[in-house]
Image: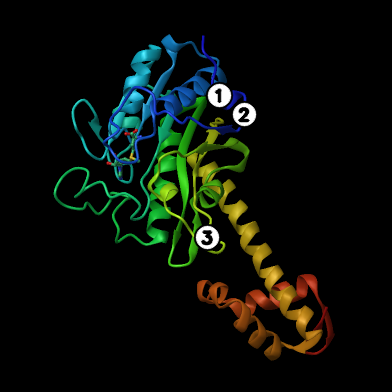
């Protein structure tokens, strides 16, 4: 049997799309890449092509459907756009599990993000759908919230020991750099992540442009792969919540350290004022920010006199 290029290297580059799907469907993943994803799934779930069940929850033009047929594997294709034989499924509202006859070996997604390529109202249909993740009115936060539902939905449809994977890129908008893969990694259990691989992009529109200064064109996407352990969604919620809590706690600690490094020794009022200057984003998210600062001071700094703290 063929082997997956993702089993040989964490960077995979196909300059040719290969046969499958439609090259006219913008954002199509390419058959040579999808073959690597499926072969990786077969190898890492100790399956044979005949008992390997693969689900693509963003089937689009059907690239994965064509590759699954070529490899002889069991396959279901879902998409917001229910173009027959695709089964209509909105990953933000509909359970993937409910569309399948059994838990599967691998569930793959390739969600569109922000206004990169618009699907509803452009690639298909005549109006932009609210839950289409290419809806240009979505904020980054709304997109990320929908993405977490997508990932949990994928995971739920995966059998224990099976894989769930997503293909996602980075984006620059109005001087901001968004690396969604970094957010995705935080959303799901750290203990299930098994690979962060790179898919080189060829012929994407930005490749042809020239950029000045330090503006580096983005020419790759990330393939994130998790292996499902037997754990309930409740346990997942707890694990990811404590991962994130740790990160937020760390951020507060770092911010107060920066303020105290500058102040040396300071009263509580001076510390509040300094932290307000450097961390308005944290304060906006936490009504009890003054209590949070006092808690961090008690944990990590010295109370030299009443209401006065030092490094
Ligand atoms: C990048 S394209 C996938 C292309 C596909 N991999 C191919 O090779 O043709 C993303 C797909 O996600 C679908 N989509 C957008 N929002 C969705 C949602 N909420 N639920 C399910 N599919 C969605 C779009 O209709 C589009 O077909």
Q: Secondary structure at mark 3?
A: loop
Residue 303 x/y as whole percent: 82, 82
Q: Secondary structure at mark 2?
A: loop
Q: Is residue 95 above or below residue 131?
A: above
Residue 154 x/y as whole percent: 42, 36
Find disc 2 in the rendering and name its residue: 9
Marks 1 & 2, CB-CB < 8 Å contact: yes
The answer to whether 295 appears left or right of 199 in the picture is: right
Find disc 3 in the rendering and name its residue: 215
Q: CA distance from mark 3 to mark 1?
A: 30 Å
Residue at point 30%, 58% (across, down): 136
Q: CA distance from mark 3 to mark 2?
A: 28 Å
Circle 1 packing at 10 Å, graded few (<14), some (14-19), many (20+), is some
Q: Is residue 143 above or below residue 200?
A: below
Residue at point 20%, 48% (across, down): 122
Asked whether residue 100 appears in the rendered view, the answer is no
Residue 167 x/y as whole percent: 45, 39
Q: Secondary structure at mark 1?
A: helix
Q: Quadrant of the C terminus?
A: bottom right
């Amino acid at each position: 049997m063929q082997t997956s290029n993702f089993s040989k290297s964490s960077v995979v580059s196909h300059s040719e799309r290969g046969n499958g799907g439609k090259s006219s469907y913008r954002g199509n993943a390419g058959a040579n890449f999808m073959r690597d994803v499926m072969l990786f799934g077969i190898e890492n779930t100790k399956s044979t092509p005949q008992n390997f069940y693969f689900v693509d929850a963003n089937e689009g033009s059907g690239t994965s459907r064509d590759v699954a047929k070529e490899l002889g594997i069991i396959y279901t294709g879902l998409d917001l756009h229910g173009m027959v034989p695709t089964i209509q499924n909105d990953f933000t509202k509909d359970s993937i599990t409910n569309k399948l006859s059994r838990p599967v070996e691998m569930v793959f997604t390739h969600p569109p993000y922000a206004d990169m390529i618009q699907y509803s109202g452009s690639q298909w249909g005549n109006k932009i759908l609210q839950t289409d993740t290419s809806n240009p009115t979505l904020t980054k936060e709304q997109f990320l919230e929908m993405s977490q539902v997508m990932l949990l939905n994928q995971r739920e449809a995966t059998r224990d020991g099976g894989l769930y994977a997503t293909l996602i890129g980075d984006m620059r908008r109005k001087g901001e750099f968004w690396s969604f893969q970094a957010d995705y990694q935080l959303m799901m259990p750290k203990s299930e992540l098994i690979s962060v691989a790179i898919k080189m992009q060829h012929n994407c529109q930005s490749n042809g442009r020239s950029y000045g200064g330090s503006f580096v064109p983005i020419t790759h996407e990330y393939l994130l792969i998790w292996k499902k352990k037997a754990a309930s969604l409740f346990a997942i919620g707890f694990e990811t919540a404590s991962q994130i809590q740790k990160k937020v706690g760390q951020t507060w600690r770092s911010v107060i350290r920066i303020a105290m490094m500058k102040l040396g020794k300071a009263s509580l009022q001076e510390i509040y004022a300094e932290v307000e200057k450097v961390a308005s984003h944290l304060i906006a998210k936490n009504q009890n920010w003054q209590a949070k600062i006092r808690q961090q001071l008690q944990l990590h700094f010295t109370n030299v006199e009443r209401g006065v703290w030092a490094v």
